[in-house]
């Protein structure tokens, strides 16, 4: 049988459209709202942001209309299983792609995120029954959420926000950090595959292969995107807040630690070393500077050295400032990205100090207005300020936190001191006598998140944070039983 080339082309087009695959050439035109999942994506990864939004919009309609809470729970469990099976691979690939952090700590961060991010079970209903009837308040989805993810926790944030956002009945379009786009795409595709294999809709989470700022602007302008959630630095969060759309902003921190004279100094040394060196200090909630009061100062530095920290001389400290910091165009100092998240041994080698890789932290004694105290340097270099009194330490710590209201900690046995610092610093996370990572459930109680929304107030986010509150009222009548 003879078949013309036009007939072959027509058959191919028919088969492709039946499979939901992309048209062979050119960008397909946007389908009308409510039609079948659009073509063009590769397990959630799209070339064009409008297509990524459209596909996520269609998936969300389906998700909200046809899937029960039990379905959501089952699919979230499938996501956890899938992510668990990739923890080592993604941790290794993040180190390779971003060039930052420590493999073993990324494994721990992933496991905390996978195991301790709550699913739909946290969406509890409030009910009031009284003389005038019955009231129910429930958590409803926003719809499509745009989620911007950082380079410091790329796949951890995708896993965390996927569980939280889809548990709330939403779909998500991610704009990932360009420096982590390959591992982010692999993670998103694996999670999408797990969702579909567990019976969920295609494209419940999507992204563009090439993340850009223009994509974020397009999503802010797209009426199908109902919520913008940004996890990253201050500049990005401020840009989102100006977008005119409902935003959840999880911005920068510069967590101060106070160690007072009543503290268990050995515990303080151990926990501060552990926290400040975790993943080479790239976490927003990691200890960034310490204010040790009076006699606690020398003791703390000694304990940090006992843990393995390298104490720098004043001359070495100033050499390091010139190497790893640079003037911020808006004033003050900022980290030189080349050194962010590098091992202490590598940073110190660059100023001629040789230490083994087992030395995870450099420590320097500096005044309270030193650039290492004021800049969010995100590397394992910990400045220690010797404060004359507890009151002075509180003032210095509050100034160093810059009003981010992100994270702070204290080592003390004096309950008044614990309370006074908490009231002065007003942070979302406040940890007493442990590493600050305890505040996100890593070695502490409570659920985990990688999106700590201080600026907009949602705090330690979970499914509830990404939902709308809706109320339903029934007038006095047949339903009450008392
Ligand atoms: P970053 O601000 O450079 O990038 C974060 C994301 O925002 C990236 O996807 C980036 O492409 C995007 N972005 C940057 N500027 C933007 C703009 N003007 N408009 C739209 N998008 C923009 O931050 P990073 O280096 O990836 O991460 C480190 C920073 O993030 C630190 O300041 C850290 O404290 C903070 N952080 C905060 C949290 C939190 O939960 N609060 C979590 C992780 C990281």
Image (spheres, rainbow, N blue to C red):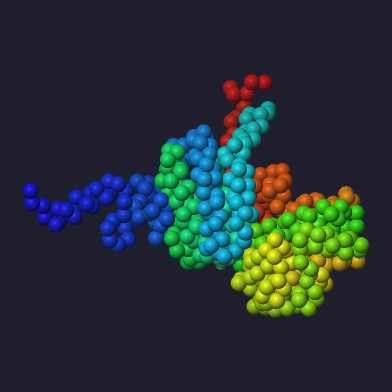
Residue at the top extreme, as displayed: 481
- Specify whether 170 is left or right of 400: left
Viewport quadrant of the C terminus: top right
Task: Identify the residue at horizontal 48%, vertical 66% (top origin).
Answer: 212
Question: Count the marks: how many?
Answer: 0
Q: Position of residue 377 (x, y in %)?
A: 68, 68
Task: Identify the residue at horizontal 47%, vertical 41% (top origin).
Answer: 64
Visible in this render: residue 91? yes
Using the rendered view, name the quadrant where residue 197 is placed: top left
Along the viewing direction, whichever of 128 and 185 lies nearer the viewer: 185
Q: Position of residue 327 (x, y in %)?
A: 67, 78
Task: Identify the residue at horizontal 60%, vertical 57% (top origin).
Answer: 103
Visible in this render: residue 465? no
Task: Identify the residue at horizontal 45%, vertical 38% (top origin).
Answer: 198
Using the rendered view, name the quadrant where residue 372 is placed: bottom right
In this picture, is 101 found above or below 166?
Answer: below
Along the viewing direction, whichever of 379 and 266 lies nearer the viewer: 266
């Amino acid at each position: 049988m003879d078949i013309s080339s036009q007939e072959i082309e027509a058959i191919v087009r028919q088969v492709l459209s039946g499979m939901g695959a992309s048209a062979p050439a050119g960008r397909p035109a946007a389908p009308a709202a409510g039609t079948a999942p659009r073509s063009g994506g590769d397990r959630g990864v799209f070339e064009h942001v409008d297509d990524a939004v459209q596909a996520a919009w269609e998936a969300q309609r389906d998700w909200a209309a046809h899937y029960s809470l039990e379905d959501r729970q089952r699919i979230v469990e499938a996501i956890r299983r899938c992510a668990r099976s990739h923890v080592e691979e993604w941790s290794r690939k993040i180190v390779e792609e971003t060039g930052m952090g420590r493999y073993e700590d990324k494994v721990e961060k992933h496991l905390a995120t996978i195991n301790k991010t709550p699913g739909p079970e946290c969406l509890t209903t409030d009910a009031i029954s009284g003389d005038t009837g019955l009231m129910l308040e429930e958590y409803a989805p926003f719809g499509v959420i745009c989620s911007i993810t950082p380079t410091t926790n790329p796949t951890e944030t995708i896993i965390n926000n996927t569980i939280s956002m889809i548990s709330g009945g939403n779909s998500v379009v991610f704009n990932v950090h360009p420096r982590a786009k390959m591992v982010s795409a692999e993670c998103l595709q694996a999670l999408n595959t797990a969702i579909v294999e567990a019976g969920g809709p295609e494209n419940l989470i999507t992204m563009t292969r090439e993340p850009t700022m223009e994509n974020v602007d397009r999503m802010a302008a797209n009426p199908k995107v109902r919520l913008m959630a940004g996890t990253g630095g201050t500049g990005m969060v401020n840009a989102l807040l100006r977008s005119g759309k409902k935003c959840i902003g999880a911005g920068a921190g510069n967590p101060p630690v106070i160690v007072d004279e009543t503290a268990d100094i050995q515990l303080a040394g151990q926990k501060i070393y552990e926290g400040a060196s975790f993943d080479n200090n790239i976490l927003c909630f990691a200890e960034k500077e310490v204010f040790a009061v009076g006699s606690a100062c020398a003791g703390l530095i000694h304990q940090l050295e006992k843990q393995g920290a390298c104490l720098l001389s004043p001359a070495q400290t100033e050499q390091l400032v010139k190497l790893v910091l640079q003037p911020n165009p808006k004033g003050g100092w900022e980290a030189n990205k080349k050194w962010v998240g590098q091992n202490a041994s590598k940073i110190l080698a660059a100023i001629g100090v040789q230490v083994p890789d087992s030395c995870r932290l450099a420590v320097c004694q500096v005044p309270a207005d030193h650039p290492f105290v004021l800049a969010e340097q995100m590397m394992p270099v910990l400045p220690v300020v010797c404060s004359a009194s507890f009151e002075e330490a509180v003032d210095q710590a509050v100034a160093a936190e810059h009003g981010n209201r992100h994270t702070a900690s204290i080592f003390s046995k004096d309950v008044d001191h614990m309370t006074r610092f908490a009231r002065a610093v007003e942070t979302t996370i406040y940890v007493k006598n442990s590493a600050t990572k305890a505040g996100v459930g890593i070695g502490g109680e409570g659920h985990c998140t990688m999106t700590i929304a201080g600026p907009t107030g949602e705090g330690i986010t979970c499914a509830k944070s990404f939902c709308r509150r809706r109320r339903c009222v029934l007038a006095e009548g047949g339903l009450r039983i008392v």
